[in-house]
Image (spheres, helix red, strand yellow):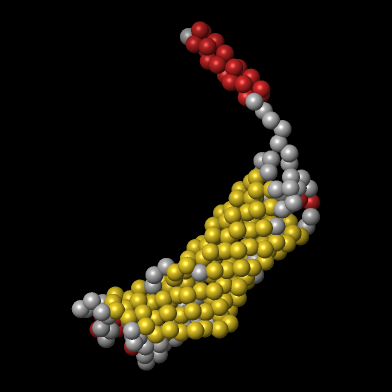
């Protein structure tokens, strides 16, 4: 048993010595980055968005479609970053942006026929997020963020494919947002890829007498976005 402990101790010692010999100095970029209260930046983002469709009771009785759903659609977003330092672990983050969305609602009918409602629109988004940072290791660190976002639709372009009737939706949304990111410090800037999830809280469906809305009771937004932040 003593020989076994001596052997393990020797192995650990050799490992620590090899680690010490292999240690290299790493230059710490933007070493006083967190000393500033406010930081600014910009980002490009690639959202994938859809409507979450909740069916109405009339879907089974009055609607001839046997399925109504919204597929995931890629979109584009660009905006600015305003980051306020709170303490060593928390920041307050505002990321106003312009988003170009194209959301669809598909209607499948018996016999293999289908119709599609396409809603192309531009949204102004105002997310306010609380950011939790891990301890910085050389030139990198992880972070988590969560908060809410208020969005306003500025213009909309409706498309009717294969004769579908127009679907009416609202122009304001409120969403819960959360995500995770990774910060990499370079000599003159910080780069932070980030994955963020958004779940709309407001029912965007506006009841009408059009056939497109007969089977729908509720439409909420769901979005997954990859951000590329530069600060």
Q: Position of residue 148 (x, y in %)?
A: 58, 67
Q: Is residue 132 visible?
A: no
Q: Is residue 159 left or right of residue 229?
A: left
Query: Taking 69 as reference, is 88 above or below it?
Result: above
Query: Taking 137 as reference, is 57 above or below it?
Result: below
Q: Position of residue 161 (x, y in %)?
A: 37, 83
Q: Is residue 110 left or right of residue 231?
A: left
Q: Is residue 201 left or right of residue 127?
A: left
Q: Residue shown at 32%/78% (left/top)?
A: 107
Q: Residue shown at 71%/36% (left/top)?
A: 26
Find the residue positioned furthest to the left: 111
| Along the viewing direction, whichever of 87 and 23 lies nearer the viewer | 23
Q: How many numbered marks appear?
A: 0
Q: Residue shown at 65%/45% (left/top)?
A: 140
Q: Is residue 15 visible?
A: yes
Query: Taking 40 as reference, is 15 above or below it?
Result: above
| Along the viewing direction, whichever of 195 and 5 lies nearer the viewer | 195
Q: Position of residue 229 (x, y in %)?
A: 64, 58
Find the residue positioned furthest to the bottom: 209
Find the residue positioned furthest to the top: 3
| Along the viewing direction, whichever of 157 and 171 lies nearer the viewer | 157
Q: Quadrant of the C terminus?
A: bottom right
Q: Residue shown at 52%/79% (left/top)?
A: 121
Q: Position of residue 93 (x, y in %)?
A: 67, 62
């Amino acid at each position: 048993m003593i020989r076994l402990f001596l052997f393990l101790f020797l192995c650990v010692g050799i490992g620590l010595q090899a680690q010490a010999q292999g240690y290299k100095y790493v230059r710490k970029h933007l070493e006083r980055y967190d000393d500033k209260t406010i930081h600014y930046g910009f980002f490009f983002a690639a959202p994938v968005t859809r409507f979450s469709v909740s069916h109405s009771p009339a879907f089974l009785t009055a609607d001839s479609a046997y399925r109504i759903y919204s597929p995931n659609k890629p979109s584009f977003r660009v905006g600015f970053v305003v980051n306020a330092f709170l303490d060593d672990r928390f920041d307050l983050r505002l990321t106003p942006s312009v988003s170009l969305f194209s959301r669809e609602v598909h209607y499948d009918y018996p016999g293999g026929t289908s119709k599609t409602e396409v809603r192309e629109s531009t949204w102004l988004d105002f997310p306010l997020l609380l950011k939790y940072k891990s301890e910085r290791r050389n030139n990198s660190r992880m972070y988590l963020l969560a908060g809410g976002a208020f969005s306003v639709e500025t213009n909309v372009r409706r498309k009717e494919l294969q004769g579908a009737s127009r679907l009416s939706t609202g122009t304001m949304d409120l969403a819960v947002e959360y995500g995770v990111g990774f910060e990499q410090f370079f000599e003159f800037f910080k780069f932070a890829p980030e994955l963020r999830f958004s779940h709309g809280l407001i029912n965007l469906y506006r009841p009408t007498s059009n056939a497109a809305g007969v089977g729908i009771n509720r439409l909420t937004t769901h979005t997954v976005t990859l951000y590329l932040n530069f600060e």
